[in-house]
Amino acid sequence: MRSSLISRLAIAAALAGSLVPIAARAQDQNIPVMTLRAALQLPPDKLPTVFRSPNPYQHEPYNIHRTDGLSRNPDDCMRWGCIDRR
């Protein structure tokens, strides 16, 4: 009984481990690789909304922040513009 349980767990772990690289490649399939500086030099119509950094230690992709100028967040206000403060 114990060897049967261990063999089942080993098979399940091997199958789950074999699917991890496929899922990672599918997730990043259409995300371009570029630096933030290179992305901000592109024309607005060519700017991707999400892109990966070439830095291997940065795991999350960049997300280009777009706003309509109505932010009350002080950090967004300094960078992207804001509405009047009251």
Image: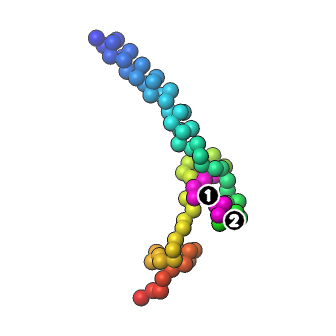
Q: Tell me which corner region of the image, top left, top right, bottom left or bottom right, holds residue 86.
A: bottom left
Quadrant of the frame with the N terminus? top left
Magenta-drawn stretch contains 75: no
Can you identify the residue that label 1 sits on? 48
Q: Which stretch did the figure color magenta?
A: 45-53
As drawn, is 16 to the left or to the right of 34?
A: left
Question: Which residue type does callout 1 highlight?
Answer: Pro
Q: State the residue in front, 29 or 76.
A: 29
Residue 55 percent coordinates (x, y):
65, 49
Q: Tell me which corner region of the image, top left, top right, bottom left or bottom right, holds residue 12.
A: top left
Name the disc covering residue 86, or none. none
Question: Which residue type does callout 2 highlight?
Answer: Pro
Q: Residue at x 54, y 65 (%)?
A: 65
Q: Residue at x 63, y 46 (%)?
A: 56
As drawn, is 6 to the left or to the right of 18?
A: left
Residue 46 sits above or below residue 17 on the image: below
Residue 21 percent coordinates (x, y):
54, 33
Residue 73 sits above or below residue 52 on the image: below
As drawn, is 42 to the left or to the right of 51?
A: right
Residue 23 sits above or below residue 60 on the image: above
Can you identify the residue that label 2 sits on? 43
